Amino acid sequence: MKNFKYVLFIFLLIISIFDEILFYDIKDRLLSNINKASIYLKVDEQSLKIEDKDLTINIKIPSIYYKDNKDVERHINSYLRNEINSFTNIKRQSNRLNLDKTYKTINIDYHIPFKNKDILNIVVYKELIEKDNKINLYKNSYVFDLRSGQRIYLNHFINNEEKIFRNIENHIKSYIKENNLDVDLSMIKISKDTSYEISDNSININFNPYKTTYKKEFYEFNIPYDLFKSNTKSIKSNKIEANIDTQTITKDTKYLSSVINIPIIIIDDKDFQKTINDKITTDIMSFYNTTEEEIKNFYVDILYGDTKFLANVDYKVKKNSDGVISILINYYKYSGGAHGLYEDISYNIDTKKKEFLYFDDLFEKNSNYKEIIEEQIRQNIINLEKENSENIGIYNFKELNENQKFYIEDDNLVLYFDLYDIGPYSLGIPSFKINISKIKDILKDEYIGFFK
């Protein structure tokens, strides 16, 4: 009985991060979580084997069955399927074009380290076997809120995230130093997107590849709950606005290879659904068609052997709740030279008004919002320079663009700039996160609710 109480206490520590629902009896709470998860949530799998020239890919795709909420079931299944398919298609393309002939076999599998009536944690493993039989192991952990279907990132249950993220980094680096591990410290960077796995009284964090046959060390670290328990907050993820599937188009012409992932929005209003999907699909295919014409007309003479140009499209859903859908489309093309070019295009959709949102729409007209936000960006740059001296002088920000690009993520407005807009290519696509607390007074009232 004493052992049961100890196990029960540890179990409830990690549960308390996520679960707001109270049970009068602690033992009933534990048994209720386990039993309901077993009855209403089941996980099946789809097995696939892909045989390409010089590359075999074995895939097990998890497929959940969730009796309580079919919308949540569909959303999670689409999310996991899209993640696995996107990775697989890029690896196949790289193999076909001789861009990466390192691997002969890729195995994709999964396991479920944790589930209860509100939370599902699925870990997807990728085993990449090289031609000389050396192995690289990757894993990505996905934690979902079964009440909404939303993915739960690290910052969703941690307050004061910048401070706590630094504490976690320091904890890991101290562990590395104490154990004299041969680890690349530049990989130890905690962010919202860091992969974490739920354990008993802790979380496990990993950086990919988390294990290789070149080294004995694992890039996986246990973070005790005590390190952040005083800075946890309840999960309050809201219902998704839309299910989002993916239409994948692969094209291989004489000159061009493309993997194109197009988000397909599914909502109750079918007329508005068609408007959204037509707009996004038209823009994406215009990118492909324009690139194809450019290559035919201007670049054919520089091709040699079996080489081809690339034009790939993928996307990330930045927000899908609280009356707004915010999607970031990632474009990439390579048409010769030292490196490829990429561009991000965002679509911010007001699902209540049934319209696309543009930057100027968000703010009160006489609020001097541009000056206020420009000052926030300058302060962000100052902070980046303080954090890393290599950032000093690299940013050349002057003012917002006329049609400023942005997306919404959690309770933040994120502004971003194209390649070369405010710095060199090495800067990539710079983005600046501004919390709702800094701009609430200049936002129009009807849009404040988007930032939760």
Image (cartoon, rainbow, N blue to C red):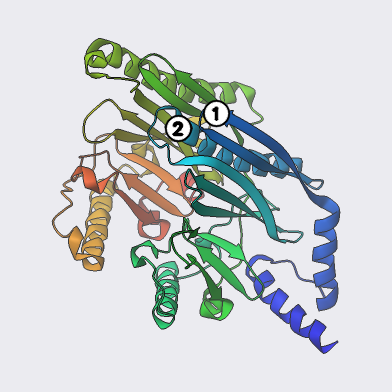
Q: Which residue is mark 2?
A: 95
Name of the residue lying farthest toward the front: 132
Q: Secondary structure at mark 1?
A: strand
Q: Nearer the viewer, residue 299 or 160?
A: 299
The residue nearer to you, when weighing 429 against 216, is 216
Which residue does the image show at 41% across and 22% down from the upper left?
A: 257
The amino acid on which the numbered mark 1 sits, given as a three-letter code, is Asp
* 341 left or right of 127 in image: left
Amino acid on which disc 2 is placed:
Asn
Q: Is residue 258 above or below residue 193?
A: above
Q: Nearer the viewer, residue 356 or 187?
A: 187
Q: Badge 1 is on which residue?
A: 52
Q: Residues within 10 Å of mark 1 (few under 14, many from 20)?
A: few
Question: In the depicted view, which residue is nearer to us: 304 or 250?
Answer: 304
Residue 159 disc label: none
Residue 105: horizontal and vertical position, in percent?
Answer: 55, 41
Q: Is residue 315 above or below residue 204?
A: above
Query: Residue 179: percent from the left, percent from the top?
Result: 44, 80
Q: Is residue 69 left or right of residue 361?
A: right
Q: Secondary structure at mark 2?
A: helix
Compared across the picture, whether 371 is left or right of 250 comes to left
Position of 302 with respect to 70 (left or right) is: left
What residue is at 16 percent from the left and 53 percent from the top?
394
Q: Local crowd at mark 2 within 10 Å, few (<14), some, or many (≥20)?
A: some
Provide residue 450's location: percent of width, then percent of height. Answer: 50, 47
Does the residue at mark 2 contact the one at mark 1 (Cβ under 8 Å)? yes
Residue depicted at 29% across the width and 16% down the height: 295
